[in-house]
Amino acid sequence: RRLIITPLRGRKGARRENRREEMSEAAPSSGEALQAHFFAQLSGERARALERDGYVVADGVFPDALAQAYLGEIKLLQAKGLLQPNKTQFGLPSGEVLVCRKPNIFEADLHDPKLRQVTPKLAQLFAGDELVRALDDAL
């Protein structure tokens, strides 16, 4: 249920009227309800911290039912050996590429349609823009 957000610097969305809505712990059923939930979780002090510090660690952003669904799909990917070690590449002035692996950090590239087929909830998050729009509204 923890989300760490580090957006690109300089990107700000239009401010909107405060539209916080009370949400149940069940996963919101529509994209609009999910966006409203994200906005309620990420606006206010969290948005100010994101603007001030360039990142925010936010617990509870995803409703419990949705967080559990994501966790189940991630465990499925792990069990099937479909998670890859995370790595970052740096281009050196010499033209050489330095690849750094992060220990105990894994990822799944949801650009791969085969992975999206076995992870419908994560695929929905990947394809949707509710989280991005909520962040734009909060900032």
Image (spheres, rainbow, N blue to C red):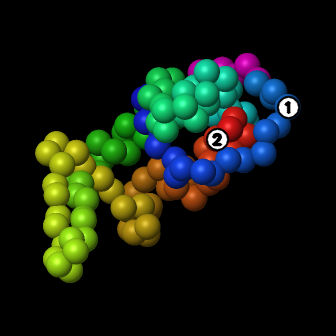
Assign the magenta stretch its main secondary structure: loop
The amino acid type of the residue labelled 1 equals: Glu
Residue 14 as seen in the image, left or right of residue 73: right
Q: Which residues are magenta?
A: 21-26
Camera-nearest residue between 32 and 121:
32
Q: Earlier in the sequence, mark 1 or mark 2?
A: 1
In the rendering, at what x and y percent does residue 104 appear?
Answer: 16, 42
Q: Secondary structure at mark 1?
A: loop
Q: Residue at x 67, y 47 (%)?
A: 12
Residue projecting furthest to the right: 17
Residue topped by disc 1: 17
Q: Residue at x 24, y 65 (%)?
A: 90
Classify mark 1: residues with Cα within 10 Å, few (<14), some (14-19) or many (20+).
few
Residue topped by disc 2: 135
Q: Rounded to the nearest whole Å, what is the CA distance between mark 1 and mark 2? A: 14 Å
Q: Residue at x 85, y 31 (%)?
A: 17
